[in-house]
Image (cartoon, grey):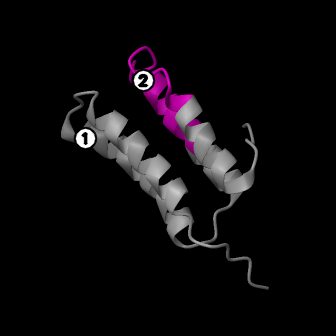
Amino acid sequence: MDDAVPWDAEAVRLIVDIERSLDSLSLDVNGRGEFKALLNAIEFQVDACRPTQAVIAHVSAAIVALAQTRGLSHRWQNLPEQLQRVQIRLFGCVETR
């Protein structure tokens, strides 16, 4: 069974916007790399035209948890909402984990 969906340029743009907001946090290369690796996992799901809501929800939760662990929650306050917009764009709703 083919469960492919059309490629979604708007979802990719939302992910790129998150990456841009990450760049404004003045993290070192390793710090940015941690976040970019997780964001790439979401972007790859979209690029493959087979996004899975549970996977994107888990990776989104991991990104938020990493931001909290790194003490970035106060500087990146809109991160959860940005990630939710990606899910809403792809699935019409947000799956919480």
**x then y, percent, for residue 94:** 73, 41
- Residue at point 39%, 24% (across, down): 70
Q: Is residue 21 left or right of residue 56?
A: left
Q: Amino acid at mark 1?
A: Asn
Pointer 1 residue: 30
At which x and y percent is residue 14? 48, 47
Label 2 element class: loop
What's drawn in magenta, residue-wise?
60-80
Give residue 78's mark: none
Q: Position of residue 68 (x, y in %)?
A: 48, 22
Q: Residue at x 38, y 18 (%)?
A: 75
| In-front residue for pair 3/28 | 3
Residue that carries the numbered disc 2 in the rendered image: 76
Discs 2/1, front: 2
Query: Which picture quadrant has residue 35?
Result: top left
Q: Is 74 colored magenta in this rendering?
A: yes
Q: Quadrant of the C terminus?
A: top right
Q: Residue furthest bottom?
A: 1
Report whether 6 appears left or right of 24.
right
